[in-house]
Image (cartoon, grey):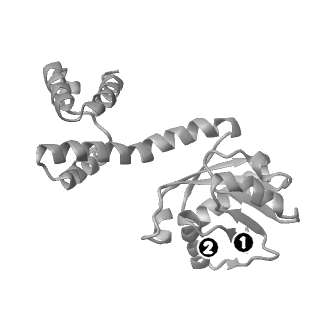
Amino acid sequence: MFESVNVIGRGRVGTAVAARLEERGLELREDGAELVLLCVPDAAIRDVAGDLAPGPGWIAHVSGGTPLAALDPHQRRFGLHPLQTFTRARGPEQLDGAFAAVTAETAEARERGFLLARLLGLKPFELAAEARPLYHAGAAIASNYLVTLYRVASELFRAAGAPPEALVPLMQRTIENGFELTGPIERGDWETVEAHREAIRATRPELEPLYDVLAEATRA
């Protein structure tokens, strides 16, 4: 396993990862580290990797959608994407229990990726290189669009005079219930669905197309 790591990039992910590595007793160093871990924005990975001289050590990135080719010319490489959303307001505990997608080109690289994931407190699974864009799309829908849905629902609540924060326990319980579908579409109550459309059309008409798309996807 690695004993020294150079974490490049101390944004939300890099800060949590570096703190966890320190907790586990690994040495964080800039020169001569056994692993260079790129926690930089996706668009910067290729340039940062290209500026590093290939050496005997390993290099990896934590991007969900960036191909391993972005780490050229380095050959001892892998990708490890923590399937989690991060905030600077919290620490390395954000990693605990989350999953991690590991993409590797050799058995040794896969083993290294799995070991690092477990060291970070993550549950690793192998992800084929060609599947990364589709995987990342699913992750973005689950996380990013949840934020969008909350904001849209909050706008409708405000327009109705209801407190948006009341939505949070509802959303949390939906997750706790294993995403079991309830409500008018599950019941086949299309009169209520149409009443929703009419109310949105009268108050926030720009949101009606979004409601229609979601309703059709939910019905399917």
Q: Position of residue 72 (x, y in %)?
A: 83, 51
Q: Which mark is residue 6?
A: 1
The reply to whether dot 2 and dot 1 touch (C-beta < 8 Å) is no
Type of amino acid under label 2: Leu
> In the rendered image of this protein, does residue 215 appear above or below residue 77?
above
How far apart in space, not on screen, are marks 2 and 1 (Cα)? 10 Å
Q: Earlier in the sequence, mark 2 or mark 1?
A: 1
Q: Residue 184, located in which quarter of the rendered image?
A: top left
Quarter-wise, where is residue 27 in the image?
A: bottom right
Where, quadrant-wise, is the C terminus in this rendering?
top left
**Of the pair 14 and 128, the residue shown nearer to us:** 14
Give the farthest residue toward the left: 161
In this rendering, position of residue 51 left or right of residue 175: right
Q: Residue at x 80, y 48 (%)?
A: 106
> Who is closer to the viewer here, 90 or 206?
206
For the image, the number of numbered tags is: 2
Q: Which residue sits at x=25%, y=30%? A: 205
Crowd rating for badge 2 (residues with CA inside 10 Å; few <14, some 14–19, many 20+) = many
Q: Which dot marks residue 21?
A: 2
Q: Residue 173 bears which disc, if any?
A: none
The front one of 192 and 210 is 210
Q: Secondary structure at mark 1?
A: strand
Residue at the spot x=70%, y=64% of the render? 37
Q: Give x and y (percent) for residue 78.
A: 73, 53
Secondary structure found at label 2: helix
**Position of residue 198 measured from the top left corner of the image (x, y, whole percent):** 16, 25
Identify the amino acid type marked 1: Asn
Could you tell whether 139 is left or right of 210 in the image?
A: right
Residue at 60 percent of width and 78 percent of height: 22
Can you tell which of label 2 and label 1 is closer to the viewer? 1
Quarter of image, res 14: bottom right
Quadrant where the image shows the N terminus: bottom right
